Image (spheres, grey):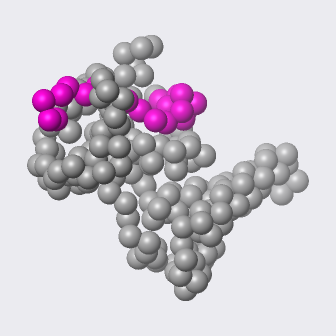
Amino acid sequence: MHEELDALARHYHHLHNEVEGSDPESSTRRKLQDRLSEVRERFDRLLEEWVSDEELKQEWRDYLHTRVPEPDGPPPIEPLVFQGRTDAGSIVEVRGSKDEFGVWVDGSLQERIAAEKDLSVDKPVFHFRWDGKEIEETFGASGEALRALDDYLQTEGAAPPWEYASELLADGLIDVHFDLTPRGRRAHARIESLA
């Protein structure tokens, strides 16, 4: 949740800068203000749903509006580095960072593994071997989000598609700075191979 709040705050800051740089009477400014309001509403909704500590909520609101240092909580989630489905229909996820990964099957932690090298490949079709099974990678981000990410990566000087940031973060494709993760590079390679 920490990552999503941070990504939304960064999107809000970006839009706020665009609003400030636009003509006060323009339709562009009104559209930007509408988008700014949507991001703020989503930020507030996430804050209410996922952060129970009132002091921490206020720290996040201050971060959004006054650009004070980023709050320490809630604790960051373990990033998704692989997701796939077995032949039997179980969902296998690998979460973690560096060489501390957990293999989760249908939401239950099965084991901890050291697989940084294995999970850093960027080929379009990736199979993860676990428990005698070869599991093909799947992606949960919408086609619209993936196309927006691809457009951003293909267009020099383009603004990141902030409106899809939380979806792309949740699927493990980007980090909070909108840099591709190894999983994101695999998704992007898959999009390019289909083009």
Looking at the picture, does residue 136 appear above or below residue 70?
above
Please provide the residue range marked out in magenta. Answer: 130-150
Residue lying furthest right: 25
Question: Do we see residue 151 in this rendering?
Answer: no
Say if the magenta span includes residue 151.
no
Say if the magenta span includes residue 136.
yes
Q: Position of residue 195 (x, y in %)?
A: 45, 13
As drawn, is 22 to the left or to the right of 43?
right
Residue at image location 44% in from the left, 72% down from the top: 74
Q: Position of residue 154 (x, y in %)?
A: 46, 28
| Rendering quarter of residue 126 | top left
Residue lying furthest bottom: 55
Residue at image location 21% in from the left, 31% down from the top: 128
| Rendering quarter of residue 47 | bottom right
Q: Position of residue 39 (x, y in %)?
A: 66, 56
As drawn, is 81 to the left or to the right of 164?
left
As drawn, is 84 to the left or to the right of 170?
left
Question: Do we see residue 130 in this rendering?
Answer: yes
Residue at image location 44% in from the left, 48% down from the top: 169
Residue lying furthest front: 88
Relative to the observer, which residue lies in front, 126 or 187? 126
Looking at the picture, does residue 81 appear above or below residue 39?
above
| Rendering quarter of residue 58 | bottom right
Residue at image location 13% in from the left, 49% down from the top: 113
Relative to the observer, which residue lies in front, 99 or 174? 99
